Amino acid sequence: MSEHLCDLLKIRYPVLLAGMAGGPTTPELVAAVSRGGGLGVFGINGMTTDAVRAAVATAVEAAGGAPVGVNVLLAGPTEPTTDDTALTEGLRGVRICFGLEAPMLPPAAAPRTAAADLVAAALEAGASVVSVGLGDPTPVVDVARAAGAPVVAMVTTAAEAERVVASGADVVVAQGWEAGGHRSTFLSGPGDDLPSIGTFALVPQVVRAVSVPVVAAGGVMDGAGIAAALCLGAQGVQMGTRFLGTRQSGISEAYRERLRAAGDDSTRITRGVSGRPARGIPNTLTRTLDETGHLGWPRQAAAIADVRRAAVAADDPEHFPLWGGQNAGATAREPDDAEHLVATLMHDARDTLRRTGASLPG
């Protein structure tokens, strides 16, 4: 029998913060989740090693001795669906509105900081758990092992779960189709089709496929969702969209309003923002990019970085990505405290389990 999730990660409650890179997971949010008894996870993709050290050190200090994790994305390059000229022309009007010059687009072979180097910097700064998405964890396993840090790997199928465990993952996150942000698919199906398995169908299959703790992700927004995941065999949950609504998250009030207003069919999968499939609320930017095409991962994100920065600075939710899951509408009406939210979620999960058990017939 594998070690229990909470013992393995040294956390009180089986709640993991999704590692949402690019601003949503602030050091304050990460620290608050960890202080609350869960595992705060900092998304470090796209950062420099110096920036990683500084941000993680801040989160670790604010966490007050509670464990802090980091997340990196391991996706390889994807093929472009357009060229530099067409993308620049497609975004010309947007850039004019923000007063931006056409950018010098990054070369196809632009150097990137290796995932292992980012992880090493984070571990040096005090992180104690390593999370990966969009790939086999092999590139970071040795670095994590040397530091005694468990490895958490995200998957979207049972086959991917078996692969990451064979490569050294200590925990598997079963990411259902409902989840916001990037799809963690890395073993492609026929025609590069995306696996569209819902969380509650995926979790029990992954539990049967592997012998390590399984964490459910996708559509979980409250204690009832946590209780349901535990009943299906998961030992915990990973939550991203729900924590976007807290006051410590790095998103704007305009973004929060879009999440609160979302219905059950308000989100879509787009490849236009990064060259990889990701779920969010459509807006002018995603519709433009879906029509224009993309330069592939990782070039696309760099090619539109100036537009995203300008839109965030102007708090214009039509021109930065609004990542969110299919249950985004359950975001709190008023921003709540992330530390308190962890305890509230666990209280509600226990209450749900008690009430449900008491009402079973027979």
Image: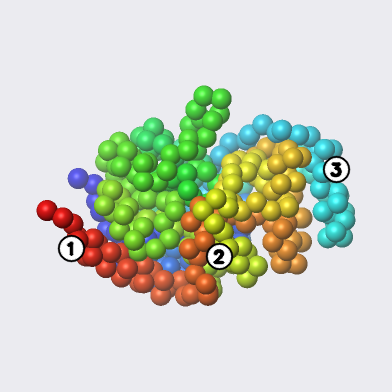
Q: Amino acid at mark 3?
A: Glu
**Which of marks 1 and 3 precedes in the sequence?**
3
Give the labeled residue for mark 1: 358
Residue 212 placement, left or right of 29: left
Q: Give percent across and percent down for residue 295.
A: 72, 38
Please, which residue is most extreme toward the left here? 362
Q: Amino acid at mark 1?
A: Ala
**Considering depth in this image, is 310 or 167 the residue closer to the camera?**
310
Q: Quadrant of residue 263?
A: bottom right
Position of the N terminus, as image quadrant, is: top left
Label 1: which secondary element: helix
Residue 238 visible at all? yes
Q: Give percent across and percent down for residue 140.
A: 47, 44
**Considering depth in this image, is 123 or 337 the residue closer to the camera?**
337
Distance from Cα at disc 3 to Cα at disc 1: 62 Å
Q: Quadrant of residue 65?
A: bottom left
Give the labeled residue for mark 3: 89
Give the labeled residue for mark 2: 260
